[in-house]
Image (cartoon, grey):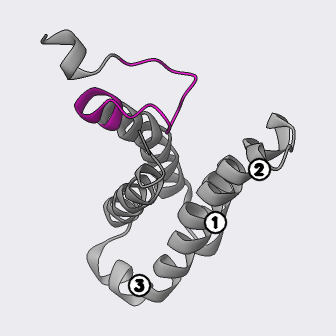
Amino acid sequence: MNTEWHFPVMIFASLVVFFLVIRAVLPAQEFRQKKYMVALLSVLVVIVGMLFGKYGATWGLPWWVYYPIPMLMTVLLPPFVLKLRKTKTVLYLILSFISAPFIHIFFSFFFGWTEYMPFWEIPSAQIIFQ
């Protein structure tokens, strides 16, 4: 079965979650003021990061290159670019670290798609409820 279309769907879901995380961290007025910066961060952190992670492995890069670079982009860029204070940075880091497993559990459990975090096996609802 062709699963190539899973990746764009996962990118879209990650974009939505990233926006929600940033929205939870920033007050509404500040979020609106920085909407273009948030959009640029979304492209860099989510789209470029996920593409680099996916194709870094395909290009034969070692895991210690294609895995940490997107993770570091996710951890370092938003607090720096958005000029988050310490408490907002901590909140952002907590939510961002929770978001990746949440997305993986969602797609693995409800759809049986395991590509997001292939090293973490989550049974799908189809298998459990057969």
Mark earlier in primary sequence (2, 1): 1
Residue 119 on image: x %, y %: 58, 22
Residue 76 on image: x %, y %: 67, 57
Q: Residue at x 86, y 44 (%)?
A: 61
In this rendering, the label closer to the viewer, 3 or 1 = 1
Residue on which the image places disc 1:
48
Quadrant assignment for the N terminus: top left
Mark earlier in primary sequence (3, 1): 3
Task: Judge whether residue 119 is colored magenta.
Answer: yes
Residue on which the image places disc 3:
35
- Tell me the distance, in whole angstroms, between the alpha carbons under discs 3 and 1: 18 Å
What's the amino acid at mark 2? Gly
Residue 20 on image: x %, y %: 32, 60
Per the image, label 1 sits on a secondary structure element best described as helix
Range covered by the magenta-colored residues: 107-122
Residue on which the image places disc 2:
56
